[in-house]
Amino acid sequence: MTDNKKRQREESPGKTKTKKSKVAIEMYEPAILTHKQCLLATFYGWDSQALDEESENAATVNDLSNVIQGSVLHGEGNSALVVGGRGTGKSLAIQSALSLSSEERFIPIHLHGSVQTTDKMALREMARQIRNRGGTVSSLDALDKEDHLIDISQSTLTALLTLLSASALPIVVILNEFDLFATHARQALLYCLLDCAQGGQRRGGLAVIGTTCRYDAIDMLEKRVKSRFSQRVLHVSSPRTWTEWSTLARNALSCEVIEGVPHMSAFEHKWEIHINALFKDPQFDLVLKMLFDMSADVQTLYRVLAIPIANMTTETPFPSAKDFLLASMSQRPIDAHQLIDTLPLPALALVIAAKQISSRDIDQFTFELVNKEYDDWARKTIMAPTSRSIDITSTGARVNISVWPKHVLMGAFDTLVDLNIFVPVASANAIASGEMREYCKHRCSIENGEIRQAVEKRKDIPTALYKWGHSWN
């Protein structure tokens, strides 16, 4: 009985610590889930994102806001066309402009040229969205009849006026892929929408805003349609400088504190500290630079950022730079030599150990083999009686040098496998087996010269590790 009580006393501190950590995690759970939803809403276009006031697109948002405000507040009929390449932020600019008028009541109608391929389909979709916002569309059943609409301007105008009169609220019509609507028969829908906007045939106000990737979209319009367009063409572009790109990424990973969510303010403070550290991480910096150099496509950036955010849990609330790097690799393969400059020192040490092994004509290795190679080097270099606990980097900085334990090296080894720097040569069944993981054979995909260059570029590498990276033949 005494032994049991003693055992309980010995186990109780660990149990108490586990319970405390679990309570701490549960305390932040509502804030973490709310934060996750907030970021995903930005990435997938469910919510607008604040644009940098100094960016070129901010002026476009301001002009769009003036167009919308004129229709919403003053009952004007307006039209505009937003032009820009794919992924440059056309939808984001419109969504931001709409959000500036969110305090006023109006009905936004979103149509897409790839989905509504005929005027009849577009009118049906307009009727559906107006009815969902409280409008009384008495003629919706009539629109479904095959013989009710003919692709001529008069019948289209009659049906359109019926829809627009279904609600007294201002209406903002967004025509995504505006150029595809220009391919409809006689451009009847465009003609009627622009004619209603220009002629002020609707008391509640009407704004027609199109988006297109074609810079010659205006030239596709018939003369009668072009004459009813306001000729207000606005341009958007991808971030042109690294500062704009980095600011865009930081804003996308930021979330305002939402009132009423327990501990939201405390979690956002922790998140801001994490993001500041993340933007200083060389691996995350590599991800942003590769995406910027590739195309500076905002949608691609959001897809990469969204993957680690979607995987956030209460146990892992702070995605690492490695998570974003793997997400980037899922969108676009990355050469291994581009990654070696960003490796943490334990991973770089294992790469050097693998090359030391290959210098003895052993091309394949296991974790146990490279771990032994590292241990032998550390025993001779770091743990020797004549060695110093403080080493000097290539920049002259003093750093503590110590032997990394096996579990740290195992984590570094897994990172190298995830990044395809260490490529498995064993069977898939052997790799999947937890017992065989440390003994699965791998090969290194990086050449000796690339490793030497990486070692020479690193400013944080201790002199002892630097010399080891140059010691093979």
Image (tube, grey):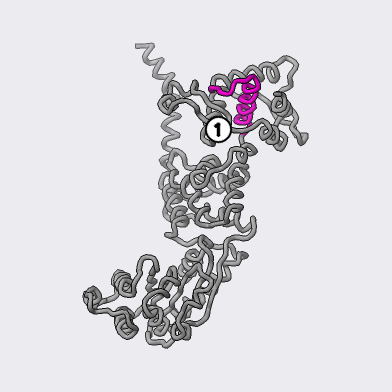
Q: Main secondary structure of the magenta part?
A: helix
Q: Quadrant of residue 28?
A: top left
Q: Quadrant of residue 401?
A: top right
Q: Nearer the viewer, residue 85 or 182?
A: 182
Label 1's element?
Answer: helix
Residue under pointer 1:
416
Q: Within 10 angstroms of label 1, few (less than 14), some, or many (20 or more) residues?
A: many
User: Can residue 286 be seen from the camera position used here?
Assistant: yes
Q: Nearer the viewer, residue 220 or 402?
A: 220
- Residue at point 45% right, 24% down? 13
Q: Is residue 264 above or below residue 106?
A: above
The answer to whether residue 111 is magenta is: no
What type is the residue that disc 1 sits on? Leu
Left or right position of 159 against 398: left
Image coordinates of residue 266 in percent, x first then y, are 50, 47
Point out the image quarter for the N terminus: top left
Image coordinates of residue 169 in percent, x first then y, are 36, 78
Q: How many marks?
A: 1
Left or right position of 71 against 423: left
Image coordinates of residue 265 in percent, x first then y, are 50, 50
Q: Is residue 187 above or below residue 398?
A: below
Point out the image quarter for the C terminus: top right
User: Can residue 133 be seen from the camera position used here?
Assistant: no
Q: Nearer the viewer, residue 453 or 82?
A: 453
Image coordinates of residue 111 in percent, x first then y, are 38, 69
Q: Nearer the viewer, residue 357 or 323?
A: 357
The answer to whether residue 359 is magenta is: yes
Left or right position of 66 against 170: right
Q: Quadrant of residue 436?
A: top left
Please report the bounds of the magenta region as a residue range. 344-366
- Residue at point 52% right, 55% down? 252
